[in-house]
Image (cartoon, rainbow, N blue to C red):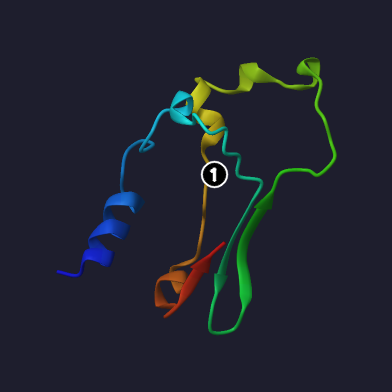
Amino acid sequence: MDFKFLSFYWLFFSSDYLCEPDANVYDIEFTKFKIRDLDTDQILFEIAKPENEELEIDDLNLEKFDDEGSARFVRYQFTPAFLLLKHVGAT
């Protein structure tokens, strides 16, 4: 079996994150994420952190998260046609 497929399968179907938030010792922050069809360059999903916008602690509704990790989840809902795409890219 192809190693790339196994890696994708394991990452795609893992039940939790591969590392805890406190493991981010280099303070890496993802500010934008995009999934696209590479054959047509059509954007299928895009999310970005607002630029130049600082939030006050009072502006955050932390009660809406069940635990600290739930704020890290992004829910994708693609149609079955997504599985027919030949080349998908993420940046």
Up/down of 22 relative to 32, above or below: above
For mark 1, what is the residue?
Answer: 74
**Quick check: 88 above or below 10?**
below
Splitting the image into 4 quarters, where does residue 16 fall? top left
How crowded pointer 1 is (Cα within 10 Å; few <14, some 14-19, many 20+) is rated as few
The amino acid type found where label 1 is placed reads Val
Q: Provide residue 53's location: percent of width, then percent of height.
A: 84, 36
Name the one closer to the observer, 3 or 24: 24
The quadrant of the picture occupied by the C terminus is: bottom right
Dot 1: element? loop
Total numbered circles: 1
Between 52 and 85, which is closer to the camera in this rendering?
52
- Residue 60 position in % (x across, y down): 73, 22
Q: Is residue 18 left or right of residue 59?
A: left
The residue at the point 79 percent across, 15 percent down is 58
Residue 43, image quadrant:
bottom right
Residue 27 in percent (x, y) is at: 57, 32
| Name of the residue lying farthest toward the right | 52
Tell me: residue 37, above or below residue 57.
Answer: below
Q: Is residue 30 above or below residue 65?
A: below
x, y (%) of residue 68?
52, 22
Q: Nearer the viewer, residue 56 or 60?
A: 56
